[in-house]
Image (tube, rainbow, N blue to C red):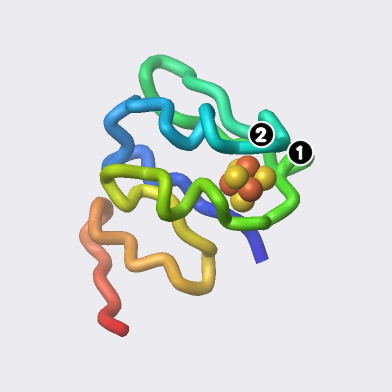
Amino acid sequence: MRIIIDQNLCCGSAKCIEICPENAISLVDGKAVLDEAKCDLDGICIPACPKGAIDYEDDYAGVGCGFYREG
Ligand code: SF4
């Protein structure tokens, strides 16, 4: 299990950075990048993202990279 941040959907709002208690996310070239070593998988960042760019890998819809799975 891991968290995925879709670089194609990320708008650089930094909402996830503000809310992450582990300081596991940083902005690189205007896109949110996750440090998996710091992430504790609590998922707080998922609903915080205004673009829906963050999800658990198992639930990842991948709408930004040409792959979409409903449900
Ligand atoms: S799942 Fe939790 S610890 Fe991991 S990046 Fe999101 S808010 Fe931070």
* Residue 70 sits in quarter: bottom left
x, y (%) of residue 33? 52, 32
Assess disc 2: are there few (<14), some (14-19) or many (≥20) residues with their C-alpha within 10 Å of its C-alpha: some
Task: Decide which of tag 2 and tag 1 comes sooner along the chain.
Answer: 2
Height in image: 6 above or below 29? below
Height in image: 18 above or below 58? above
Q: Quadrant of the N terminus?
A: bottom right
x, y (%) of residue 23? 67, 29
Q: What residue type is labelled 1?
A: Lys
Residue drawn at x 26%, y 66% is 67
Residue drawn at x 46%, y 53% is 46
**Mark 2, residue position:** 24
Residue drawn at x 46%, y 58% is 55
Disc 2 + disc 1, Cβ < 8 Å:
yes
Height in image: 63 above or below 14? below
* Residue 38 sits in quarter: top right
Height in image: 31 above or below 10? above
Q: In which quarter of the image is the C terminus?
A: bottom left
The yes-or-no answer for disc 1 within 8 Å of ligand 1 is yes
Q: What element carries label 1?
A: loop
x, y (%) of residue 22? 72, 36
Q: What element carries label 2?
A: loop
Relative side of 37 to 55, left or right: right
Residue drawn at x 32%, y 61% is 62
Relative side of 5 to 39, left or right: left
x, y (%) of residue 30? 37, 18
**Mark 1, residue position:** 38
